[in-house]
Image (cartoon, grey):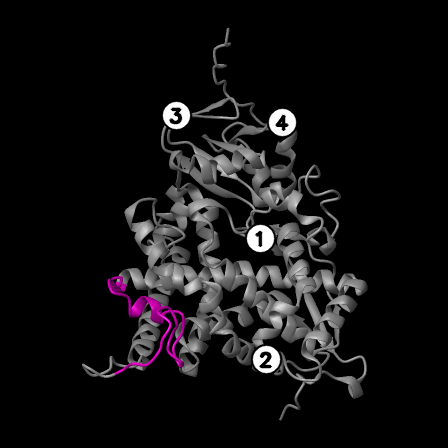
Amino acid sequence: MTAPPATPVPPPTAPGALPLLGHAHRLARDPLPFITSLRRHGSVVRIRIGPTAAYVVTDPELTRRVLVTEAGHYAKGGKIIDALRVFFGDGLATVADGDTHLRNRRLMQPMFNKAHVATRGSVMIDQVRSMVEGWRENEERDVLADMNDLTLAAFLVALFGADLPEHLRAEFTALMPAVMKGAIRQTLLPPWATRLPLPAHRAHAERVARLRDLVDRAIDHHGASLPSAPPDGADPGPTCPHAPPAQGGLFAALLTADRPLTRRHLQDEAITLLTGAIETTGTTLAWTLYEISRHPDVERRLRTELAGACGNRPLRHTDLENLPYARQVLQEAMRKYGPAWMVTRTATRDVELGGHRIPEGADVVWSPYLHQHDPARFPAPDVFDPDRWDPRRAPAARGSFLAFGDGRRKCIGENFARTELQIVLAVILRRWSRIELVSRAPRPQAVVTVRPDTMSMRYGHRDTTTASVDARPRS
């Protein structure tokens, strides 16, 4: 006789909650140790953020149910998403599940396939190289700021084309750090506090309005630069249906779609892409350079691989496919440092997860950082070991690597992000034969991403007679 199914029970509550605050003090004071500590209390653990309960999933198999097999029961939402949606609108990362999300994702998917991203490789390399060559030898530099600047500049030329006017690029570069700082502040505040008429909130709203205007100007310039349709009866020649114009960018796919988005939705998508491209990619690169500076053996292998791929000429986009160890190094940096550490969904009905009952409307939390520091799947998780991604070793751990999410809301820009990461890392290593950490060792700081609290480096040459061919003289 078959036993009846077990009745779901409430999940265990994490210890250490305070009256009124719940576990908010732990999330504010030591969020990464706290989130990883929940694993020992169960596969689903209840925490309180103030008076509100949230349910943290610590088992990657259950997280897969949330993101993939039972995704319909867990809608895109929760505190972080709701806070970002107020200012950034309904971009692909924040729009609610449903027909709008599905239509927009299908419309944007061709922008980010490998073949399409490859058409932007050369202009991205040129942009990054021109900026890295502008660094002065032995100058102490803020690594995170530099990486954010490089990723923003590379993404702008990929998104809007190589002919985006310099004054527009400069305005984006000046504005985006303040917008990102304000967006992060909004996610940390309780919802009622974000609605108060405080000067900081007004300033953030004004910056986002300026960003929308700036995006509008970039869209108008980009649209004007696209070639007009050929006359009736003219042969347009052989074309790829998803290839952007020679001087265009990825955004051309949206501007020339059969059913184009409204201007507001174009703004939302551009802002979502920009913020996602900067924060996650910039922090990954900063941590990668830090780990390279600490591991001479990793640096030697990277430089040997680069020399074998490029020889005595500058980096080309086609060289990226011949840099498997560089991909392992970047993958390990993403594993060790997130980049996202806490992501939320909202239960659309009463659900059972891992034998536990979760009520409709509750926040369900999953953490790439937690899963990627699970010693059962990543032995010695605090050790930086790119060889754990050797193809002969990696398959056992792939299901727990969630830096890009999973399921129908998986990051659409994964191909682009991996390409951009490889380009920036390769250009820096080709330009500078010495990278040196000059600040104290950084501490991981969990905000929206896992950022270094401080990181300064100097770049130079071990021997000026063997400087890289990418190191052309500066005027």
* Front residue (pair 25, 11): 11
Is the C-beta separation of discs 4 and 2 under 8 Å?
Answer: no
Q: Earlier in the sequence, mark 3 or mark 4?
A: 4
Q: Is residue 213 above or below residue 168?
A: above
Q: Which residue is mark 2?
A: 129
Is 245 colored magenta in this rendering? yes
Q: Which residue is mark 4?
A: 41
CA separation, marks 3 and 4? 22 Å
CA separation, marks 3 and 2? 53 Å
Name which residue lies at 67% across and 78% down. Answer: 310
CA separation, marks 4 and 2? 49 Å
Instruction: Point out residue 161 in the picture as x, y percentages from the top left corner.
Output: 41, 77
> Within 10 angstroms of label 3, few (less than 14), some, or many (20 or more) residues?
few
Name which residue lies at 62% across and 78% down. Answer: 315
CA separation, marks 1 and 2? 25 Å
Name which residue lies at 66% across and 51% down. Answer: 336
Position of 448 compared to 437: left or right?
left
Instruction: Point out residue 126 in the picture as x, y percentages from the top left corner.
Output: 54, 81
CA separation, marks 3 and 1? 30 Å
Q: Nearer the viewer, mark 3 or mark 4?
A: 3
Position of 269 compared to 400: left or right?
left
Q: Which residue is mark 1?
A: 339
Which segment is the magenta one? 235-263
Q: Amino acid at mark 2?
A: Arg
Q: Amino acid at mark 4?
A: His
Q: Nearer the viewer, mark 4 or mark 2?
A: 2
